[in-house]
Image: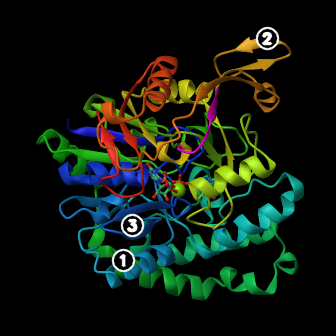
């Protein structure tokens, strides 16, 4: 089973890090293919919790080579702090390699990300403020800086100068708060980036060649997504999305492999739904009900610490995620979080202007006003965290799982019942 893609099916934080880590023992390479340190993947191993942002979850595997692919945007400050923090905890980061073509997040893009949000006022996206959007914009605009460019000090200087001057035309210096000004100082940016280039040089590889060779030799490569289908730049709830391709197709473009080398696409789905930042969310729970589920699930962001918005499971979204990703199977996570409910609601469709819809509305304005049509299911009112075999789950929990499979038309291959690496039922 050589080429496996792991993607998020909702709005992120489904438990992709844990799903990736669980497969880690049998995997030769783990490649991050999109996004950057906007991601926050928590992995719990032997009671120790690790929060990964830019590093692929494969860093925690003893055998796998962790790889940062061409589709990722790399903030070198964040990269080296994360490596140092991991190494201080005894995690070996020496095998990590980075694509020569990955783009670099320069400090001015971090500042601009935050300033853009302030300018949007009430319409803000609620970004993570890591400079993701501005850096992908530079990439598309063909003014970005790639990892390989850091090896050429003259090129760094000309690109940084060009960018800072252009950006200051859009955001005049007097509008930039004092504490952001250092992020626009050309000399110090150039000096820092060139130094980072020297440190990154030994890790630079052609990740496409590396991964293709491994797949052709029959090795197992896991492609780990950041974010999720509903945050995808093309297929998500635009403009309330991230700026990269977070669906399975992103693994191909973001690493440089062809679709014929992919055997399995695992969609990670939380047993309910969460979202961080602004944008429509049909099954959102407000008030005390929302707070209760947020507390049960510990739904606070790994990257920004923000409280996640929470709601019931939405099968329209899962059907959509199955389709846009071509999922072969689903890893259902956090089923244990629903242990105490008398009844559980699941959205099987939406009603818009009195018309029932089982598929995602074509127009987002319809999605934004869609009224979920719920199926009420009985809860199991039992602690399932110790269960390791599907047949040992309470009937109501099994019914919940099989109902999702039928409704989405996709097999559920693992069921998460806790944070730990082994807290899962594999079917
Ligand atoms: P990711 O961004 O998709 O990797 O997900 P996050 O790490 O941001 O959020 C998922 C959270 O749920 C993490 O704290 C995980 O440790 C935790 N988690 C994952 N699977 C399970 C599960 O099956 N049960 C419980 N209770 N927690 C889980
Ligand atoms: P993981 O990989 C949840 C959200 C932000 C914001 C929008 C745009 O842990 O699932 P950005 O900084 O990317 O420009 O923000 O996307 N967002 C995430 N939400 N999980 C993530 O990553 C996210 N990465 C970005 O909250 O709404
Ligand atoms: Mg996360």
On the image, the x and y values in percent for residue 268 come to: 45, 40
Whole-percent x, y for residue 421 in the image? 32, 56
Q: In which quarter of the image is residue 277?
A: bottom right
Disc 3 designates what residue?
148
Query: Judging from the image, what secondary structure is the residue with disc 3 in?
Result: helix
Query: Measuring 70% from the left and 15% from the top, which residue is drawn there?
Result: 357
Q: Where is residue 236 in the image (x, y as percent from the top left)?
A: 64, 37
In reply to whether residue 421 is colored magenta, the answer given is: no
Identify the coloring: rainbow
Q: Do the residues labelled 3 and 2 touch (CB within 8 Å)?
A: no
Residue that mark 2 sits on: 355
Mark 1 or 2, closer to the camera: 2
Answer with mark 1 or mark 3, whichever residue precedes in sequence. Answer: 1
Residue at 30% across, 59% down = 58
Q: Distance between the residues labelled 1 and 3?
A: 24 Å
Which residue sits furthest left?
217
Q: Name the residue under label 1.
A: 86
Circle 1/circle 3 CB separation < 8 Å:
no
For the magenta stretch, what is the residue range?
Answer: 339-346
């Amino acid at each position: 089973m050589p080429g496996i893609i792991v993607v998020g099916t909702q709005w992120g934080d489904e438990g992709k890090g844990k799903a990736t880590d669980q497969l880690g023992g049998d995997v030769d390479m783990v490649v991050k293919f999109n996004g950057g340190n906007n991601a926050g993947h928590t992995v719990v191993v032997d009671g120790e919790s690790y929060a990964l942002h830019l590093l692929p979850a494969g860093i925690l595997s003893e055998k796998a080579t962790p790889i940062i692919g061409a589709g990722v945007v790399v903030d070198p400050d964040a990269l080296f702090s994360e490596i140092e923090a991991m190494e201080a905890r005894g995690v070996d980061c020496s095998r990590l390699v980075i694509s020569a073509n990955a783009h670099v997040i320069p400090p001015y893009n971090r500042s601009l990300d935050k300033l853009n949000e302030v300018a949007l006022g009430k319409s803000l996206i609620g970004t993570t403020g890591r400079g993701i959007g501005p850096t992908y914009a530079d990439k598309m605009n063909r003014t970005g800086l790639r990892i390989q460019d850091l090896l050429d000090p003259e090129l760094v200087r000309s690109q940084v100068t060009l960018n800072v001057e252009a950006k200051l035309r859009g955001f005049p210096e007097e509008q930039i708060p004092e504490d952001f000004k250092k992020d626009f100082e050309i000399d110090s940016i150039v000096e820092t980036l060139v130094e980072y280039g020297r440190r990154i040089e030994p890790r630079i590889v052609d990740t496409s060649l590396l991964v293709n060779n491994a797949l052709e030799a029959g090795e197992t490569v896991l492609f780990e997504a950041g974010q999720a289908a509903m945050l995808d730049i093309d297929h998500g709830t635009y403009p309330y999305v991230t700026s990269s391709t977070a669906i399975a197709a992103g693994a191909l473009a973001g690493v440089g492999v062809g679709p014929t080398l992919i055997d399995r696409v695992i969609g990670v789905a939380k047993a309910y739904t969460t979202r961080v930042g602004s944008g429509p969310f049909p099954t959102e729970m407000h008030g005390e009900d929302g707070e209760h589920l947020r507390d049960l699930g510990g739904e606070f962001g790994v990257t920004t610490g923000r409280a996640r918005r929470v709601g019931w499971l939405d099968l329209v979204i899962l059907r959509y995620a199955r389709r846009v990703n071509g999922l072969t199977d689903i890893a259902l996570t956090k089923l244990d979080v629903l242990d105490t409910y008398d009844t559980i609601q699941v959205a099987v469709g939406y009603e818009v202007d009195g018309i029932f819809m089982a598929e995602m509305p074509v127009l987002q304005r319809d999605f934004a006003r869609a009224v979920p049509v719920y199926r009420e299911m009985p809860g199991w009112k039992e602690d399932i965290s110790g269960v390791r075999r599907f047949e040992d789950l309470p009937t109501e929990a099994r019914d919940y799982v099989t109902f999702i499979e039928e409704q989405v038309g996709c097999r559920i291959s693992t069921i998460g019942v806790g944070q730990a690496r082994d807290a899962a039922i594999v079917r």
